[in-house]
Image (cartoon, rainbow, N blue to C red):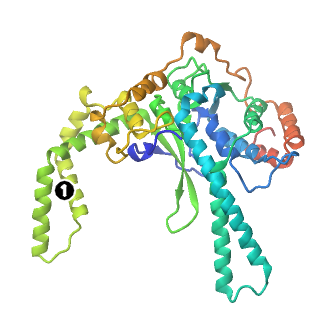
Amino acid sequence: MGVTNFTKVFKPTGEFEPVKKLKLGTKLKGKRIAVDASIQEYRANLPNRSGLVDPNGDSSSHINTLMTFIILLKAHGAEQFWVIDNKKSEKNKKNELEARENKRKSAECELKILYEKKKNLCEKKNTDSDFFSDITDEENANEELKECETAIEKKERLAFRMKQKQRDDTIFILNALDIPYMIAPEGFAAEQICAMSTNDERIFGVKMDYVWTTDSDAMAFGARSMIKRVDKVVPNKKTKVKKYYEFNLEQILANATKTIIEYEILEENDKYIKSECNRRKKNAKNNGESINAKELKEIIQQEILQQNKQIIEEYSQKKEKQFTLHDLVTVCLILGNDYNSGVKGIGYQTVLKVYKTVKLSGEQEKIRTENFGRQLSSEELSNIIVHNTDRIPFSDKEKFENFLDVIKRDRGYNRARAKKLFTKENLFI
């Protein structure tokens, strides 16, 4: 979801380092965060192996995931304001919705094959206790079954369809904890309103400091800062570590400006780079030394950039050289996002080098104007309803106890387990 390969073109501008028990450190204390609810809902409602179900047999594990995230922000001293997608606005993301549906259908077909494979593997394993000739055979069979189950889990995530009941639980939880939230106005995406709220205090009554989402379209919508969680694979291990990064718009634009100027300087010195590479390779060969051509070119390029460091800094300050939000939207349209599939043949490695020469289609220019360029009218602003603004979050203990009773009775959730999530952070004690 969001801009294709956004984080490969625009690197994070900061990282939230853990401090003791705080996963994101102390940077969020006193900050206001606009939460893209759809991202949290999707993550919370993905197929799971927890076994938590309500009386009707539907999964209730999403309640735990949503509560954990809400408490995470509270524990870090942040104020949270949620924006929930308006279902009537989904038609605006035709490209993304079609892509998701195609992935779902493909995953559903593959799942049928994988379920049958798992069934056969289990039957084969349990048919005869003497089936395995040695320990190695048994280990191989177990490994094959494990790989099959992992594949099933991945495909189930792709085939997942969220139910309205699960969406309703988000509002139920936010109301129970008195957390401010709003439904995005028709025609606007949740991440779009989140982005606007970092620049316009009229939406929530105060400006937001961050947008919490994995949808990088938020940056193209002008979000001042975005927090994005990335699961990093630990080298030489199969485990993943959750990392939280900041993408600050001002810094991203400044970094892109510098990168583009560096590309221009290297392009101007292309002939010199080639001749210098050949000269050094020849010298290395005469001296009986081996040399990596790619590494050599990178060394020479860095030497040139270092020699032109002052020029790069001076050019970066010139208005005509600066990479703007308009340019960022252009790059996002070229790469592809929720609203269009992008320009074929241009990827993340070259887009900053060529975006100025790319002629966008009429449809893409329309998306720029009608989606990324759209602003809230006075009437739309006046019609926004932000719920729970007259309440103090996490303060109504009686309401909280009733909430625990409901999720136990109607959602089959363990009351004591839910209460413990809050009390360990000294909430509702």
Circle 1 is placed at which residue position? 300
User: Which quadrant holds residue 382?
Assistant: top right
The three-letter amino acid code for the residue at tag 1 is: Ile
User: Which quadrant holds residue 395?
Assistant: top right
Horizontal arrangement in the rendering, residue 127 relative to residue 112 (left or right): right
Which quarter of the figure is the N terminus placed in?
Answer: top right
Q: 168 or 78: nearer the eye? A: 168
Horizontal arrangement in the rendering, residue 43 relative to residue 16 (left or right): right
Horizontal arrangement in the rendering, residue 79 relative to residue 225 (left or right): right
Q: Is residue 396 above or below residue 422?
A: above
Q: Residues within 10 Å of mark 1 (few under 14, many from 20)?
A: some
Can residue 71 be seen here? The reply is yes
Question: In x, y percent, where is residue 287?
Answer: 11, 76
Question: Which residue is located at x 13 percent, y 73 percent?
Answer: 285
Question: In x, y percent, where is residue 182?
Answer: 66, 24
Question: Which residue is located at x 28 percent, y 41 percent?
Answer: 353
Which quarter of the figure is the C terminus placed in?
Answer: top right
Q: Is residue 329 above or below residue 286?
A: above
Question: In x, y percent, where is residue 240?
Answer: 57, 59
Question: Which residue is located at x 38 percent, y 29 percent?
Answer: 325
Regarding mark 1 in the picture, which secondary structure is present there? Answer: helix
Residue found at the far bottom of this picture: 133
